[in-house]
Image (tube, rainbow, N blue to C red):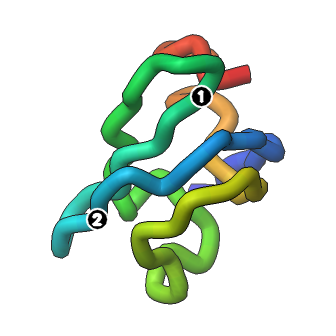
Amino acid sequence: MSYDFVRVTYDNIEATSERAVCLTIDGEQHWVPRSQIEDPDELEPSFGPGELMVKEWFADKEGLV
């Protein structure tokens, strides 16, 4: 099964775990499962804006875009 990805812009990566990444977007925190992120292995906590690719259905469901 193929999924479309959309670009999600975040303010910070607040935390990471083995299974998810906590992003701050417009002042709100969102936990995004690594399984929904394209190339999730490189993500570590960071303070500063960035972008990542998230499966479109998940980004729409969670209001990330």
Q: Amino acid at mark 2?
A: Thr
Name the residue at 46% across, 85% down.
41
The image position of residue 37, as x and y in percent, is: 54, 59
Q: Amino acid at mark 1?
A: Ile
Name the residue at 75% across, 57% down.
50
Within-10-Å neighbours for mark 1: few <14, some 14–19, many 20+ = some
- Out of 40 and 26, give the one closest to the viewer: 26
Where 3 sits versus 16, above or below?
A: above
Outermost residue on the front side: it is 47
Give the quadrant of residue 10.
top right
- Out of 22 and 19, give the one closest to the viewer: 22
| Mark 1 and mark 2 residues within 8 Å of each other at the beta carbon | no
Q: Which residue matches tag 1?
A: 25
As measured in the structure, the alpha-carbon distance from the residue carrying label 1 to the one carrying label 2 is 15 Å
Where 2 sits versus 25, above or below?
A: below
Name the residue at 58% across, 13% down.
63
Q: Which residue matches tag 2?
A: 16
